[in-house]
Image (spheres, rainbow, N blue to C red):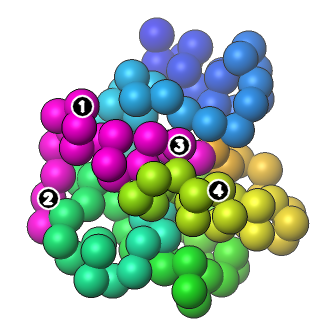
Amino acid sequence: MFGNLMSRFLGGAGGGASVDHADMQDLVRAGETAIVDVREPHEFAAGRIPGAINLPLSQFDPAKLPEGKAIVFVCLSGARSNHAMAIAARAGRTDLRNYVEGMSGWRARGGRVVA
């Protein structure tokens, strides 16, 4: 199952640049993906997906993205994270996905949140 998920994540079957909720839960559990939350620091402090790091879009620098792991971007509703993903792609990163449901969707579906 995880191999199939990573295949889709890295551009195999399914393609695209987004991650649905079920895949996001699997990625969080596996801990082998860097979750980059691009919300502002006060939003991040109010609650985040476990293991996420904060690189706010207002100061976003793709050079600060973790190396050696695929990246999933998250924000509140998917718009800022999509923008950050586009910036990172223009900088040459290819291991990128966007969790389009964002923190709103994560919370609405009962995803674990830490402060």
* Secondary structure of residue under mark 4: helix
Instruction: Give amino acid for label 1.
Output: Arg
Instruction: Say whether residue 44 is left or right of residue 74.
Output: left
In the image, is residue 76 above or below residue 16?
A: below
The segment highlighted magenta reads 98-115
The answer for how far apart the CA atoms under marks 2 and 1 are is: 15 Å
CA separation in Å, label 3 and label 4: 8 Å
Which residue is label 3 attached to? 100
Gap in angstroms between the C-alphas marked 3 and 2: 20 Å
Q: Nearer the viewer, mark 2 or mark 4?
A: 4
| Residues under numbered marks 3 and 2 in contact, where contact means CB atoms less than 8 Å apart | no
Q: Amino acid at mark 4?
A: Asn
Disc 3, disc 4: CB below 8 Å?
yes
Say which residue appears at 66% left-offset and 23% top-offset: 8
Mark earlier in primary sequence (3, 4):
4
**Which label was assigned to residue 109?**
1
Along the horizontal axis of the image, is 105 left or right of 56? left
**Marks 4/1: CA–CA distance:** 21 Å
Q: Which mark is residue 114?
A: 2
Residue 82 sits in which quadrant?
bottom right
Q: Secondary structure at mark 1?
A: loop
Magenta stretch holds residue 74: no
| Residue 59 x %, y % | 57, 89
N-terminal label among 4 and 1: 4
